[in-house]
Image: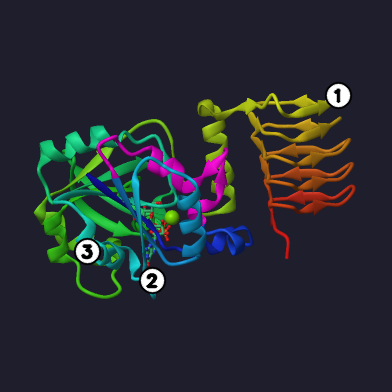
Amino acid sequence: MNALILAGGLGTRLRPLTNYLPKPLIPLVGKPLVMHIIDSLPKEVDSVILAVSYMRDKLEEYFKENDVGRTIILVSEEEPLGTGGAIKNVSRYLDDTFIVMNGDVVCSLDISDMLKFHKTHGGIGSMSLWTVDDPSAFGVVGCKDSKIMTFQEKPKREEALSNLINAGTYIFEKEIFDYIPDGVVSIEKQVFPKILDKGMYGYEFNGYWVDCGTRANYITAQKILLNNGYAHVSTDAILEDNVKLTGQNLIKRAHLRNCNIGPNVYIEDDVLVSSNVTVSNSMLLRGSLIEEGSTIEGSVISQGCIVTKNSVVTDTISAKD
Ligand code: GDD
Ligand code: MG
């Protein structure tokens, strides 16, 4: 079986991190975002198509250096074709029944179970669904006995017909291509509303779900994963003097000295955290240096950055020029 990951977005809301890394490769508790998605695929998925547009060379390099146990096919679009156009663009690689996933979602969806659901309902497609308080930033779905009756892409809050949103994983039958026009197409805006009478079914699930597209949500995704088994302090980490750890954190081969770390902190290899530093809800990426007396909250300190003495860094993504 094969699966398509839509990963052609520019990641503008995660700049400047995405100035040097394509969004699929941004780190999340020790592995790139796209690997969380690939690892969530059922065993029977032996090839994964990645529809990309930006920094294809970095993705190629990553998959050359890391054997992920499945065939990876990178397909680039000269110009972004939209979600529907990107799916149609790779139709030659797809089986009669195939999986499509938004490339920025981290969730606990059981895709094998969703496949069973899809086969039982027998429609043209199935869509994963999640409940949120404010659905206005998402696709909003109205369902009757699992059948999707209405679909609104990013409606005004007061116009949203439910709190149930498109959670960004689909299983489609190849017949879907009859309903995707050529060129730039949004599957959400131009296709879903037109195929509901062909049988689109909604699959709700429990656990966790987050779209990592913004800094705040990216850090929330880290928190969820740290609370779901990813927290760990490496035996190669050096904790010197009085290092106070609070809550769930993942600390790799870093050097920490007399500081307060946590909750929800990820520290990569070769990071040095100096005395009287406080870090919470943040990521310190490889080789960064945090000088004495600084406070870091809600932030991503990118590879090799230096946070100078007594700085206060809040709700920021920093990167070297
Ligand atoms: N290849 C390719 N080409 N990929 C694209 C393109 C394109 O032109 N445009 C977007 N994508 C990819 C993005 O990289 C992302 O992984 C996915 O498609 C969804 O696009 P976003 O830009 O992140 O959309 P969104 O988050 O505003 O809304 C979508 O996701 C929500 C769930 O997170 C919609 O599908 C909503 O209906 C849904 O609720
Ligand atoms: Mg998104």
Q: CA distance from mark 2 to mark 3?
A: 17 Å
* Residue behind mark 1: 242
Magenta region: 23-46
Taking the image as shown, residue 93 lies to the left or right of residue 77, namely: left
List x then y, in percent, for residue 260.
79, 31
Residue 268 shows up from this direction: yes
Taking the image as shown, residue 77 lies to the left or right of residue 318, namely: left
Is residue 114 highlighted in magenta?
no
Circle 2 crowding by C-alpha within 10 Å: few under 14, some 14–19, many from 20: some
Circle 1 crowding by C-alpha within 10 Å: few under 14, some 14–19, many from 20: few
Question: Residue 264, located in which quarter of the rendered image?
Answer: top right
* Residue behind mark 3: 191
Front residue of this view, candidates 278 and 175: 175
- Against 109, residue 33 (above or below) is below
Residue 132 shows up from this direction: no
- Mark 2 or mark 3, earlier in chain: 2
Front residue of this view, candidates 66 and 281: 66
- Mark 1 or mark 3, earlier in chain: 3
Is residue 40 highlighted in magenta?
yes
